[in-house]
Image (cartoon, rainbow, N blue to C red):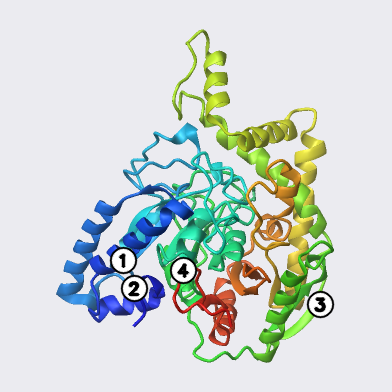
């Protein structure tokens, strides 16, 4: 049998049910892996091994009494991105301003997973307030890519993707405001869902861009992502923007038959400057899907080029409003000698926010200021509508869309840190889905010459996560890219 840390979520749960091993054994195996690799990877900001083992013992007691009647994820270790509240544990958001913030409640998605039986092992690293594409913006130091520790794991959910890739957990929660689930999945070779806006509750997620933020799941394959996502999706009365649309029962095909599905290939996503291996692996994946029965159709999403400027106006505008609460009065430590309130605000925010967060607050405040509101923010909202319409029109023609996730594979530390624009360019293929509110599924489709993973995303109409899962699962039934792990013994990249 596989080493415990190499099991998929489905295999781990089956083993627990069959009593092939206990939740304590499974949890200990992951904690050992964390102990061994964390000094190199730094995927976590907070770890809770004792609590996890206590929960594992409780899970074992429940499983011993009646395994079949236990909640579906009983005894399964996971990790939680540190922008989601988990009662009683610090929620730092990768920021010094929240280093002492211990939420007295759990985010709805976290609570739902706890109710389904999961065991959190800790909180994973993230760019400060989820602003970034590499985790280099974390105030707690960057996470390293398990495939090559001189390279970034992507971001902002880099800690979660690296933890899954390194076999530290079988699955981890991430968030995606402009690509932060999909891009780290591409860089780390993991599978992840960025859901439709409103499909998962944002209650207890520390807000970045409220009209863009979504909570997703990262795991080792589509079947695992679908299983975990089933337990966290759905309406939440505590989040007014969560959708009342019923959640589909995600049923995955036994056989990879995709006859009759139309797959759009947007010309605008295969642009100059894209790493040739990324393009060729994505095109090869499309050919594989064609072999399974889909019909690939070239399409156009003509406003794609505006997604980047539109996002980098709207997201900072929303962020500047959302981050006003970290002022030393409502949230955050209080600095300054108490001369006057402005002094206190300036000291607190000046010392505790990092450079990227300050940059975004300034960009956002500027875009929202009286003289520029119409020229920037309002204009951006109008163009956002055009981007959304591009997708609506495309989905009249095709059932789903396949595209690369990032123009390159994982880059080196420091490569983009002096050039924010170059860093923002990394997001060019992921931002449109957030602006349009549509779901995206990321999964590995190959490796480059350096052995770094390459990912592809499938985008679908709103609330069609089940279709994305079905197609992604069919792909994985006939490919092995999702079965290779950097610290695995059976790692042949065939
Ligand atoms: N890289 C993008 C940004 O920095 C997206 C981040 C995210 O999805 N949280 O805003």
Within 10 angstroms of label 3, few (less than 14), some, or many (20 or more) residues?
A: few
* Mark 4 or 3: the one toward you: 4
Q: Which mark is residue 29?
A: 1
Of the image marks 2 and 1, the number of the one nearer the N terminus? 2
Could you say which is closer to the camera, residue 471 or residue 450?
Answer: 450
- Residue occupied by mark 3: 298
Q: Quadrant of the N terminus?
A: bottom left
Residue at the outermost top position: 339
* Mark 4 or 2: the one toward you: 4
Q: Which mark is residue 493?
A: none
Within 10 angstroms of label 4, few (less than 14), some, or many (20 or more) residues?
A: some
Is label 2 in contact with label 1 (beta carbons under 8 Å)? yes
Could you tell me which secondary element the residue under label 2 belongs to?
helix
From the top left corner, tell me how far across and down residue 347 is, in percent: 54, 19
Residue drawn 76% across and 65% down?
275
Q: Quadrant of residue 290?
A: bottom right
Is ligand 1 closer than 8 angstroms to the Cβ of mark 4?
no
From the top left corner, tell me how far across and down residue 419 is, in percent: 74, 42
Q: Is residue 240 above or below residue 268?
A: above
Q: Is residue 251 above or below residue 130?
A: below
- Residue occupied by mark 2: 4
Could you tell me which secondary element the residue under label 3 belongs to?
strand
Q: Quadrant of residue 469?
A: bottom right
Could you say which is closer to the camera, residue 328 or residue 108?
Answer: 328
- Residue occupied by mark 4: 487
* Mark 4 or 1: the one toward you: 4
Could you say which is closer to the camera, residue 252 or residue 82?
Answer: 82
Could you tell me which secondary element the residue under label 4 belongs to?
loop
**CA gap, disc 4 and disc 3:** 38 Å
From the top left corner, tell me how far across and down residue 147 is, in percent: 55, 64
**CA gap, disc 2 and disc 3:** 43 Å
Residue drawn 82% across and 59% down?
303
């Amino acid at each position: 049998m596989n080493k415990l840390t190499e099991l998929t979520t489905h295999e781990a749960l089956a083993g627990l049910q069959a009593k092939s091993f206990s939740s304590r054994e499974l949890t200990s195996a992951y904690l050992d892996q964390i102990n061994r690799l964390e000094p190199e990877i730094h995927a976590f900001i907070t770890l809770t091994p004792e609590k996890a083992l206590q929960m594992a013992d409780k899970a074992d007691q429940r499983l011993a009494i009646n395994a079949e009647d236990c909640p579906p994820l009983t005894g399964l270790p996971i990790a939680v991105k540190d922008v989601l509240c988990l009662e009683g544990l610090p929620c730092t958001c990768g920021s010094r301003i929240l280093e002492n913030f211990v939420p007295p409640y759990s985010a709805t998605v976290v609570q739902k997973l706890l109710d389904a039986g999961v065991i959190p092992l800790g909180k994973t690293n993230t760019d400060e307030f989820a602003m970034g594409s590499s985790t280099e913006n974390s105030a707690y130091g960057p996470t390293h890519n398990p495939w090559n520790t001189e390279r970034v794991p992507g971001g902002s959910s880099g800690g979660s993707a690296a933890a899954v890739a390194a076999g530290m957990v079988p699955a981890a929660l991430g968030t995606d405001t402009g690509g932060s689930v999909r891009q780290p999945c591409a860089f780390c070779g993991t599978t992840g869902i960025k859901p439709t806006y409103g499909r998962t509750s944002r209650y207890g997620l520390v807000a970045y861009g409220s009209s863009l933020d979504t909570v997703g799941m990262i795991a080792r394959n589509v079947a695992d992502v679908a299983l975990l996502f089933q337990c966290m999706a759905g309406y939440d009365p505590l989040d007014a923007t969560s959708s009342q649309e019923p959640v589909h029962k995600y049923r995955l095909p036994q056989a990879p038959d995709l006859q009759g599905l139309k797959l759009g290939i947007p010309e605008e996503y295969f642009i100059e400057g894209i790493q040739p291996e990324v393009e060729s692996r994505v095109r090869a994946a499309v050919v594989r899907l064609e072999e399974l029965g889909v019909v690939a159709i070239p399409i156009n999403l003509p406003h794609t080029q505006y997604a980047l400027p539109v996002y980098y106006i709207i997201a900072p505008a929303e962020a500047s409003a959302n981050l006003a609460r970290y002022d030393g009065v409502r949230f955050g430590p209080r600095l300054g000698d108490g001369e006057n309130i402005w002094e206190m605000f300036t000291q607190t925010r000046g010392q505790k926010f990092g450079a990227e967060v300050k940059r975004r607050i300034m960009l956002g405040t500027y875009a929202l200021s009286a003289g520029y509101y119409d020229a920037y923010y309002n204009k951006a909202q109008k163009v956002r509508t055009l981007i959304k319409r591009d997708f609506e029109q495309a989905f009249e023609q095709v059932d789903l869309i396949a595209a690369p996730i990032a123009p390159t594979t994982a880059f080196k530390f420091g490569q983009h840190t002096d050039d924010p624009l170059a860093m923002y360019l990394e997001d060019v293929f992921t931002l449109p889905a957030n602006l349009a509110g549509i779901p995206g599924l990321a999964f590995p489709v190959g490796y480059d010459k350096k052995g770094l993973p390459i990912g592809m995303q499938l985008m679908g109409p709103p609330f069609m996560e089940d279709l994305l899962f079905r197609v992604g699962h069919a792909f994985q039934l006939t490919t092995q890219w999702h079965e290779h792990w950097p610290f695995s013994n059976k790692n042949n990249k065939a």
